[in-house]
Image (cartoon, rainbow, N blue to C red):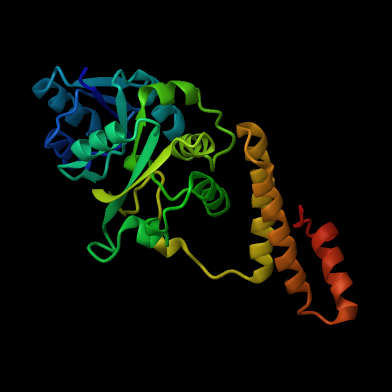
Amino acid sequence: MAKTTISVALCTYNGEKYLAKQLDSILSQENPVDEIVVCDDGSTDNTQSILQDYQARFPELFRIFINEKNLGYVANFEKALSLCTGDLIFLCDQDDVWHQDKVKFILHYFKENPLIGVAAHNLDLIGTYDGKKTFWELKNFHSETKPSNHELLQYILINGNIFPGMSLAIRKKTLHDYLPLQKIDSILIHDYELIIKALRDEKFGLIPKNLGAYRQHDQQSIGFRENEKSQTSELTKIKLRSEHYLRLQKYTTAFNLNPKIAADYRQEIKDKYSLFLKEFSFPNRMVVHLKNKYYYKILHF
């Protein structure tokens, strides 16, 4: 049987602080990778010098591309992914850490699950919750329930992506089917889009094992910060849900998704809005509703 080749798609931008730790963790894998494709998006710090140093030490491994102009986070990742030649491609951020058995474990998983095109693993946390929670626990996601692809698709469409790019691996053939990215909006970044497509096609797999460490810090380009959570009024929540319903309709059309997911979400919003209106006396109920619909224009359902 032919050897499965492994590519790493790594994007950098002003990542000098943590980049070396990330690269060292890739180079320390029990199952070595075959290539590390790096697309730098015009860093102005010491990032490019660090990359050049590693390339000089491992010329057969590193393929480095410096963008002439800044592409932005999503387009840069799309470029890096498209340049990978391996059978199995690992997405990689510039500021995290891989556990030594990550490649070996994921390679075995894909061999045991030939129908899976994209897989995500759990993560330890570096930062506020270091050693206290995993990434999935922080997101209140429980893999032991063994959700189906349909259930996961509904969950992430309503609640947002809970599988960051640095936890993903994708088969080359699957990637070929899913590129170019459609880039529907700024919320639907590259990893989110790939996951939606894989879930739609019943090709997504979960690996309930911590195979890397996700770093929480203020300089993240994209990421989850627990302190960004805040209490909001019920009306604000309804407004946000209403706006999200419009996005969900867009995603449903763009990715040919089951329309029932959006329809069920619309009904859920309507039910919560009805409960909200019941807090007002009957004479005021219609006034509040008309203001919300026509003056504030926050109702899209």
Q: In x, y percent, where is residue 122?
A: 31, 51
In the displayed structure, would residue 145 be above or below residue 259?
below
Q: Is residue 212 left or right of residue 120?
A: left
Count the marks: how many?
Answer: 0
The answer to which of 59 and 170 lies nearer the viewer is: 170
Q: Quadrant of residue 283?
A: bottom right
The answer to which of 175 and 50 lies nearer the viewer is: 175
Q: Is residue 176 left or right of residue 13?
A: right
Residue 69 in view here: no
Q: Quadrant of the C terminus?
A: bottom right
* Residue at figure coordinates x 17%, y 24% from the top left: 52
The outermost residue toward the right is 283
Residue 227 in view here: yes
The outermost residue toward the bottom is 281
Q: In x, y percent, where is residue 51?
A: 20, 28
Q: Quadrant of residue 114?
A: top left
Q: Is residue 136 left or right of residue 297?
A: left
Q: In x, y percent, where is residue 231?
A: 54, 70
In the displayed structure, would residue 206 be above or below residue 296?
above
The answer to which of 68 and 164 lies nearer the viewer is: 164
Q: Quadrant of the N terminus?
A: top left
Q: Quadrant of residue 248?
A: top right
Q: In x, y percent, where is residue 228?
A: 45, 61
* Residue at figure coordinates x 67%, y 35% from the top left: 253
* Residue at figure coordinates x 45%, y 35% from the top left: 203
